[in-house]
Amino acid sequence: MGRYVIRRLLQFIPTVLGTMFLLHYITSLAIQFSGNPVRAIFGDRTPPPALLAAVTERLGYGDPCLDQKGNPCFGLFLDRMQKIFSLNPDFGVNLRLRPVTELVSDALPYTLKLLVIAILFQSIVGIAAGVWAGLRSGSFADNLVKISTVFLISVPIFVLGLVVREFVGVKFGNVLRGQEWIPEVISRGVFSPGFKPDYPLASLIIPGMVLGAVSLATTARLTRTSIMENLRADYVRTARAKGLANKRVIGVHTLRNSLIPVITFIGVDIGSSMAGAVVTETIFNVPGIGRLVTLAARTGESSVVIGVVTMLVLVVLIANLLVDILYAVLDPRIRYE
Amino acid sequence: MSDLTSAGTAIGGAPVGGDGPAPETPETGGKDHNASLWADARRQLVRDPVFMLSFLYVLVVGSMAAFPSLWTSQDPRACSTDRSRIPPSGDHPFGFDILGCDYYSHAIYGARPSMIIAIMATGAMVLIGGGLGLLAGYYGGWVDTIISRVMDIFLSLPFLLGAIVFLTVIKRQNPYTIAMVLFLLTWPVIARIIRGSVISGKDLDYVQAARAVGAGNGRLMFRHILPNAIAPMLVYATIVLGAFVAAEATLTFLGVGLQPPAQSWGIMISVHQVYFLEDPWLLLFPCGLLVGTVLSFILMGDALRDALDPKFR
């Protein structure tokens, strides 16, 4: 166990550096091929050269290697890494010189709440649906889950978000808001078409459910196949043969083993949930990290986009590492020694 | 547009034609089995109504993308603001958009960028990702170590986040840059699939036999190992086509994909999202086309997997 964790930690370092370098290299290439990104901020106007140079320098695009096409800019990369992995992590600044770390720490609570709601929704409903379908292979329940999850997977998250916002948030919400007897938390909080600062948690419930919806489909399918496979396993037959109650066979023997891949998936999925949060937060106007990224991308503030995404990627990598270690704890068969 | 039509036949047509692995069956020694895998798959797919329906839908969307003039004689750029948001009627089945342009022709012309991006990105992914996976699986050793580590690095960058960064910084958001970034961030998935099936296939008896009679590395890889590794890749490539269509629309919606004078379903959706309540059809038509396309690709992939995997028979 200990040796596995140490080995996994040692592998983690080159992966982090590699991913950081990849991110650095694709942004550098983009800058080298399309010119100074600072010009995007000025739109159609031509800035005075002195101003352009000053802003460029301040946002960290002043390095001459960014003018040479194909140059991997190792010096700049080392510089950035030193800034990121120092005691005061520095992920760059926005146009008003506010550090990205500060922007992110303001936005983080909303995104965290959103992610927690999404993961809860996805695991509770997804696992329940998967178990329900998996235990009754070929039945109506099975087909219902199978078909509805295919539909859920094929609806892009922004289409789902838009439709839910308009139908549930606006149309259905308006009906609720017209009724006197419904408490405001429900009519103006839960069923509001966007984030409301007055109801910081209630108005995040529906966006969180939209965010969890896509992974919910995968969770349900994974649970379903995993349960169906395990039901046929020898140890389940043994458990039945020695006369254990059905409840115990399903609840203890089958379910516990079937949930190992599901938990791994939910952990690894944090990465794509982060990306999904970009879409959901934009649609529901949640002032979290995702909306920060979209707004910065739309106004061309590339320094913010690069800084925030670098930070998110670090979070995703750490989450993946924790899942891997947890996996080894959960499943004694996985000990690469 | 020839690449589009050829890819269109490659999706549904490979099992139909069966011309991929058939010629090399004599050397592999599995003549009957190998020929019958693809023939069986074809027979099963033709009888599968879900596959045929989604295949038909993809053909329709593909022909919209390749020959939009077959479907509409209207010009999507002939706009007049006094017709803004007129509901659907006989002459204009989808009505008019906010700028008073014919919405139906916009929807038809909007199929092209999505399909071009999806096909270019998937094509590059299959060629380069598949090639690297083949090399890693066949040679093993340090080649495998290097390629696998690089794949790990690419895979740990969440694809939407990476695409947003790249497209924000590059500012030239056209189908080529979008396809390039989609390919760049997803190629390791195909490479992993191919690597896995090559590793499991390279020590089989017929490969050893071919090596014993003096077949070179290239011949072994392309005539003996690859044909048997291609089925899972075909399945994944079909599904990924749908995923890329959705990804293009998502990036466009976020404002880092195609930009408004261009025509695409993503633009139709993002421009008209605020009019949903007054004129829901402005959103329902493009959303329906988009979801239908993604769904068709996923269902086709599922059907292909069932047909090509002997375990499911």
Image (spheres, rainbow, N blue to C red):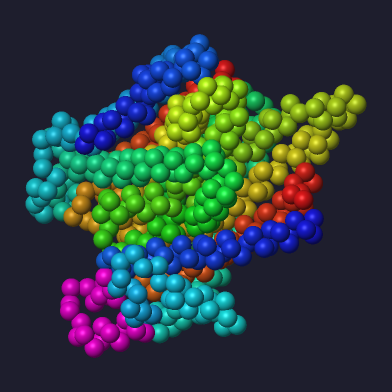
| Residue in the picture at 42% in, 36% down | B237
Horizontal and vertical percent for residue B155? Answer: 51, 53
Horizontal and vertical percent for residue B103? Answer: 19, 43
| View extreme (front): residue | B214
In the rendered structure, which segment of residues is drawn in magenta?
A35-58
Q: Is residue B177 above or below residue A21?
A: above
> Can residue A199 be seen here?
no
Query: Was residue A44 drawn as part of the magenta stretch in this picture?
Result: yes
| Residue in the picture at 50% in, 11% down | B32
Horizontal and vertical percent for residue B262? Answer: 20, 52
Q: Is residue A117 left or right of residue B116?
A: right
Q: Is residue A231 above or below residue A41?
A: above
Q: Is residue B151 above or below residue A143?
A: below
| Residue in the picture at 63% in, 53% down | A267
Instruction: Give the quadrant of the N terminus of chain A.
Output: bottom right
Front residue (pair B45, B266): B45
| View extreme (right): residue | A242
Front residue (pair B290, B87): B290
